[in-house]
Image: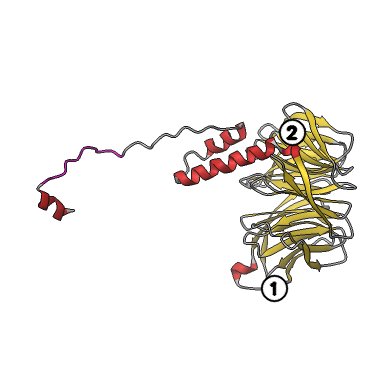
């Protein structure tokens, strides 16, 4: 640069003393959920390319939920001998893992449409499953009071967590922490280090907290930041917990029977619960107030939602689309021959898999 200045005999003059202001690009948001999400991340140091990708992802999610009533059955496979209880899918979507009351964990290839593995840990039913980050380990909860860690690469059970005095009904995982719900009336929080990280065959677990309930806990769910947990009990009580202090924020008796499923809205402002009484209840997280309640003729066993629309699996096998703002069921889709027992949707909201009491898993496609 100095050589060029000397050669041409010109000395550059400084015109600006402050950085140029950032370019303002107008963005069009298609839903309130998208707006609230981006408002919370507006100050994050991401590149314009990342922002565009996020916007595209949010738009595709909104499009998917706007067309959820056009869901069509694509494929179905009977791979278990009893009801399917849990579904987990690898990041690339090629491998589907399912648990069942027949006490087995199955690995199904979506590409070859064939069953690849069948694993038994005990003679008791398995209640749920999830994949650890990296898709190397599948965790399964069991009615035999244990949680099992299965290594996909080594094809064996790497470890067993014997952490409860009764059946483990549901498990969640986030940031090396395992959350386990049980019929022993507790939810336990464990600090876990996967074996792949420690270079050992065993996992290392320490119990960080024990969230005590009066009766059996049948379901749990985490909010997006994993700072809150919601639990549902056998007697119909929904409890919202502050995980930073392991204390109860709100306790709401909102069902007359078992709470079948619970989940936070994407913005963590609301909780939705479904029960054996056929009710769908929306709870305000900040106040603990029941702000909306809808009922159906039968229990809704499981669901997914985006904060405004719900896709639930019913006792009869139908998938119901609920418009929460309109307070109505907008569509009924024929599905399983028996109760829909679990439902899975990928992060992009482009793929849905359901499991049922009819021992089948069903793959669904959205029609735009």
The percent position of residue 193, horizontal first and vertical second, equals: 63, 64
Look at the picture and state if 140 lies above or below 60. below
Q: Residue 97: name its quadrant.
A: bottom right
The percent position of residue 144, horizontal first and vertical second, equals: 84, 62
Residue 237 on the magenta span: no
Comparing 198 with 105, the one in front is: 105
Residue at horizontal 88 percent and vertical 37 percent from the top: 277
Comparing 175 with 74, the one in front is: 74
Q: Residue 24: name its quadrant.
A: top left
Comparing 306 with 180, the one in front is: 306
Mark 1 is surrounded, within 10 Å at the Cα level, by few (under 14), some (14 to 19) or many (20 or more) other residues, namely few
Report the span colored magenta. 10-19
Q: Is residue 204 left or right of residue 2?
A: right
Element type where label 1 sits in the image: loop
Residue 11 on the magenta span: yes
The residue pinned by badge 1 equals: 154
Q: Which color mode does the image show?
A: secondary structure
Separation of residues labelled 2 and 1 (CA atoms): 43 Å
Q: Characterize the magenta stretch by its predominant secondary structure.
A: loop
Comparing 51 with 212, the one in front is: 51
The extreme top residue here reads 326
Question: Could you tell which of marks 2 and 1 lies nearer the N-terminus?
Answer: 1
Q: Which mark is residue 14?
A: none
Residue at horizontal 68 percent and vertical 31 percent from the top: 287
The percent position of residue 67, horizontal first and vertical second, equals: 70, 37
The quadrant the C terminus occupies is top right
Look at the picture and state if 52 lies above or below 97. above
The residue pinned by badge 2 equals: 282
Element type where label 2 sits in the image: strand
Regarding residue 148, the answer to whether it shows in the image is yes
């Amino acid at each position: 640069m100095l050589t060029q200045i000397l050669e041409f005999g010109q000395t550059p003059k400084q015109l600006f003393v402050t950085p140029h202001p950032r370019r303002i690009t107008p963005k069009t948001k298609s839903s309130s959920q998208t707006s609230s999400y981006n408002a919370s991340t507006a100050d994050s140091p991401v590149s314009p390319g990342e922002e565009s990708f996020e916007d595209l992802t949010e738009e595709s999610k909104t499009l998917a939920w706007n067309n959820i009533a056009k869901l069509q059955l694509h494929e179905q496979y009977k791979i278990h001998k009893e009801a399917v209880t849990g579904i987990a899918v690898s990041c690339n979507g090629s491998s589907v893992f399912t648990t069942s009351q027949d006490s087995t964990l199955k690995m199904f290839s979506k590409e070859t449409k064939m069953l690849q593995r069948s694993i038994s840990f005990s003679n008791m039913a398995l209640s749920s499953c999830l994949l650890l980050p990296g898709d190397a380990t599948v965790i399964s909860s069991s009615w035999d009071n244990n949680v099992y860690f299965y290594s996909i690469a080594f094809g064996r059970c790497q470890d067993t967590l014997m952490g409860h005095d009764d059946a483990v009904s549901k498990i969640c995982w986030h940031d090396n922490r395992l959350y386990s719900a049980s019929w022993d009336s507790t939810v336990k929080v464990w600090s876990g280090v996967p074996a792949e990280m420690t270079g050992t065959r065993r996992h290392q677990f320490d119990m960080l907290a024990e969230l005590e309930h009066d009766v059996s806990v049948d379901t749990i769910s985490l909010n997006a930041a994993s700072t809150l947990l919601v639990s549902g009990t056998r007697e119909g009580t929904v409890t919202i917990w502050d995980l930073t202090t392991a204390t109860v924020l709100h306790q709401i008796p909102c069902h007359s029977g078992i709470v079948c499923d619970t989940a936070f809205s994407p913005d963590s402002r609301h909780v939705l619960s479904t029960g054996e009484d056929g009710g769908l209840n929306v709870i305000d997280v900040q106040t603990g107030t029941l702000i909306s309640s809808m009922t159906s003729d039968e229990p809704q066993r499981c669901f997914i939602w985006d904060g405004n629309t719900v896709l639930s699996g019913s006792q009869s096998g139908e998938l119901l689309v609920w418009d929460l703002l309109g307070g109505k069921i907008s569509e009924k889709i024929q599905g399983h021959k028996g109760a829909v027992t679990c439902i899975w949707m990928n992060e992009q909201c482009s793929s849905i898999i359901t499991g049922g009491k009819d021992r089948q898993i069903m793959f669904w496609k959205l029609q735009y």
